Amino acid sequence: MGLPKIAFTMGDPAGIGPEIIVRMLEAHPEYAGQAQLFIYGIPEVIRDAEKRFCRNPLPPFEMVSATDVKTVHFSDGVLAAECGLAAYQTVAKAAKDALAGRIDAMVTAPVNKAAVNLNGIPFTGHTELVAEICGVKDFAMMQSAGDLRIAFVTTHIALAKVPAACTFDRIVRTTLLLRDAVMAEGIASPRIGVAAINPHAGENGNMGREDEDVVKPAVQHLREQGIQAEGPIPPDTLFIDSTLKKYDGIISMYHDQGHIPFKMLAFDRGVNSTLGLPIIRTSVDHGTAFNIAGKGIADFNSLSEAFRIACRRAESRLKK
C-alpha cells in the first residue's frame, strides 16, 4: 500500500488559507512522509504565500492548477469576486478528483461565501457543494476534537427556518450518520445526546411544540432500533463538560447551537468533516479571517489536525 494522496484546497486567496497551508507544511515537513501532498488552487498564489510567510523550503508537494482564474490580483482581507470564483472552482475540482479516485482525501481551507456569491453562484458552504458534486442528499456536517463530536441536523440556513427544517426524518438520518462515524472510530455502541430545539426542551410544549412533536418521537424511534440516543436535552445543560462526558456524539439542531460551545471548547484543534460522502473531506473549523489575513499570525493547528484525520481515514480505506 502506497502513501495516501491528500489534497489541500487553497481557500480564498485574500484570506488566511494559502498562509496556513504553507506555514503548516514548513512547520511539519514530516507530513511528506505520511502522504503524497497536493495543493489545489492557483500556483502563483501558493508561491507568493511561500515567499511571504516561510523562511525554509517546503516539503515536496504537487501543485494542481484547479481554476479558470490563472492569476488574481487581490488585497489581503478584501472581498473580491475573482477570489471567490477561484476558491469555488478549486473545491469543485478537488471533489471531482476525489470522486474519480485521483486523490484519496481533500482538506479544505476556508472559503468566503460572500465572495463566491458575488459571481451569482448560490453557494452556502463546502458541505453542500461537495455533497452535490458527489450526488449525495443524505449528508451531515460534523465538528470534532478528540472525544467531542457534534453533528448538525441543519447547517447554513437562517435561524427562522430551523424549526421547520428539523424534521423527524432529518433528525433520524443525521443521528445514523453520526452513529456510523463514531463506530468507524472503534466505539461499538455509541451513546448519543440529542439537543432540544427550544429553551428547556419546550417545557412540555409551553415554549414550542417541536421537541414534543418531532424530537421526542425521533429519539424514541432511534431507541427502538437499538441506538443509545437520549433527548431532547436542553442545550444549556447538554454542552457543559460533565454532561458531554456521558456521550460519544452530540446532535445539534442548528449551526450556532453547536458551533458556539464547540469553538469555546476546541477552537484551536477542531475539525469539520462531511458525513455520508463516498469521499473523504475534512476542513478547518474557522473562516477566512480577513481581519488578520497577510499578517503571518494565523493559527494553523486546525488545518494540521484536519490533515491528520484525513490521512488516518484515507489509510483505513486503502487497507480495505
Image (spheres, rainbow, N blue to C red):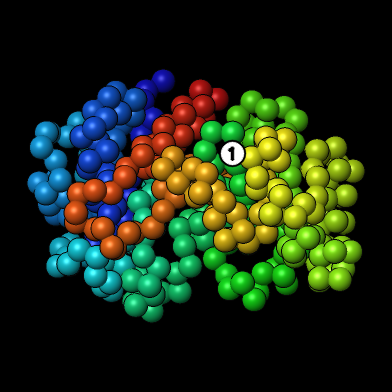
The location of residue 263, given as percent across then percent down, is 50, 50
Q: Is residue 281 visible?
A: no
Pointer 1 local density, CA inside 10 Å: few below 14, some 14–19, many at least 20? some
For badge 1, the amino acid type reads Leu
The location of residue 23, given as percent across then percent down, is 22, 41
Residue at 68% from the left image edge and 27% from the top image edge:
187
Residue at 81% from the left image edge and 45% from the top image edge:
230
Vertical order, 140 against 301 (above or below): below
Horizontal side, residue 56 vs residue 149: left or right: left
The residue at the far top in this view is 1
Horizontal side, residue 124 vs residue 119: left or right: right
Q: Assign the C terminus to one quadrant of the image.
A: top right
Q: Is residue 284 visible?
A: yes
Q: Assign the N terminus to one quadrant of the image.
A: top left
The location of residue 203, given as percent across then percent down, is 85, 64
Residue at 78% from the left image edge and 60% from the top image edge:
200
Quadrant position of residue 91: bottom left
Determine which residue is flagged by label 1: 148
How many numbered marks appear?
1
Vertical order, 169 against 85 (above or below): above
Judge by depth and name the residue closer to the eye, 256 or 153.
Answer: 256
Callout 1: SS: strand
Horizontal side, residue 224 vs residue 310: left or right: right
Vertical order, 75 against 294 (above or below): below
The location of residue 258, given as percent across then percent down, is 60, 54
Residue at 59% from the left image edge and 39% from the top image edge:
148
Vertical order, 134 against 112 (above or below): above
Judge by depth and name the residue closer to the eye, 304 or 135.
Answer: 304
